[in-house]
Image (cartoon, rainbow, N blue to C red):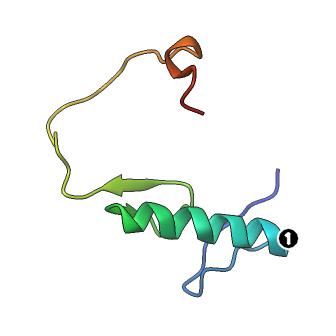
Amino acid sequence: MRQECATAVGKWAGSRHDTTLHRLVLKSTLEDVGFVNLAEEWRHCTFTPEPHPDACFDFPVSAASLAGRC
């Protein structure tokens, strides 16, 4: 498996140009609505301020519950 990591300039090692652009769009969109990117992994982020800092949510999500939303 190929390692991919974000750098300070927003490029990802081993990624095609269009993949990098799509990741930047996703990252900036999430940041625009309050998410903060985890610098060590491009695909992980945290919502700030954390609305439920002491809660752990563990529940299944079914495809049926997303019908019409995607």
Specify whether residue 50 is in view. Answer: yes
**Residue 32 occupies which quadrant of the picture?**
bottom left
Residue visible at 16% across and 39% down in the picture: 52
In the displayed structure, 21 sits above or below 26; it is below
The x, y position of residue 18, in whole percent, is 81, 70
x 35%, y 61%: residue: 33
Is residue 14 something one can see in this rendering? no
Work out which residue is located at the far bottom of the displayed protein and give it: 9
Give the residue drawn at x 30%, y 26%: 57
In which quadrant is the C terminus drawn?
A: top right
Q: Position of residue 20 (x, y in %)?
A: 73, 71
The three-letter code of the residue at mark 1 reads: Arg
Task: Name the residue rendered at 81%, 57% in the picture.
Answer: 2
- Which is more toward the observer, 69 or 27? 69
Q: Is residue 18 above or below residue 59?
A: below
Q: Is residue 46 left or right of residue 66?
A: left
Q: Position of residue 54 (x, y in %)?
A: 14, 37
> Which residue is at the far front?
68
Q: Picture quarter containing residue 16? A: bottom right
**Is 20 drawn above or below residue 66 in the view shown?**
below
Q: In this rendering, would 35 be left or right of 2? A: left
Which of 21 and 54 lies nearest the eye of the viewer? 21
**How far across and down, in percent of the image, does residue 27 sit?**
53, 66
Splitting the image into 4 quarters, where does residue 47 fall? Answer: bottom left
Q: How many marks?
A: 1
**Residue assigned mark 1:** 16
Secondary element at tag 1: loop
